[in-house]
Image: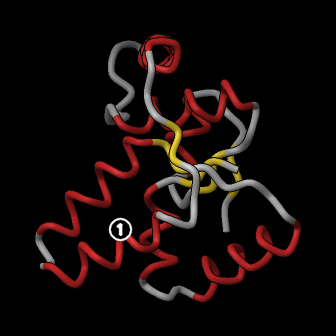
Amino acid sequence: MILDTSFLIDLFDGRQDAFEKGLELSAAGTVQRVPSPVVVELSYGAEFRGDEERRNVQNALRMYPVVEQDETIARRAGRLLAQADQQADGESGIDKVDPMVAAVADIHDEPVLTANVEHFDRLGVTVEAY
């Protein structure tokens, strides 16, 4: 399972639906991966909240394997975004992080766990909501 930023933020914020989904995945022994661009987004947000939030994010991320971006993932992300933009007749409105997350899902053949179902649907990967 590829964890998107929205899921991790909701999990860290104590949202019941995210917490229950996390328990379900853990009980099933599902491997949960965090793409490195998600680490960027979480780290960026934590910078505005201070030292405690930075430590909390750092500690929480230790629970998950991080998938580093490489050339294969970058190329796949570019193709997925280009396809979404073409289908939208020019500009899909999808930011640059979502295709990188989607590429990890595509390469690992795993769904993205997110609250942002629309963008990942348009990127053509399997999506799971919580």
In-front residue for pair 18/104: 104
Q: Amino acid at mark 1?
A: Gln
**Horizontal and vertical percent position of residue 49:** 15, 78
> As displayed, is residue 79 above or below residue 33?
above
**Horizontal and vertical percent position of residue 113:** 63, 55
In-front residue for pair 88/35: 35
**Horizontal and vertical percent position of residue 16:** 60, 88
In-front residue for pair 126/59: 59
> As displayed, is residue 96 above or below residue 8?
above
Which corner quadrant of the image does residue 88 belong to?
A: top left
Residue to which mark 1 is pinned: 58
- For the C terminus, the image quarter is bottom right
Question: From the viewer's perspective, is 17 left or right of 41?
Answer: right
Residue, x 40% and y 49% (percent of image)? 38
> As displayed, is residue 14 above or below residue 117?
below
Residue, x 88% and y 67% (percent of image)? 28
> As displayed, is residue 39 above or below residue 60?
above
Question: From the viewer's perspective, is 40 left or right of 33?
Answer: left
Which corner quadrant of the image does residue 96 belong to?
A: top left
Residue, x 28% and y 76% (percent of image)? 55
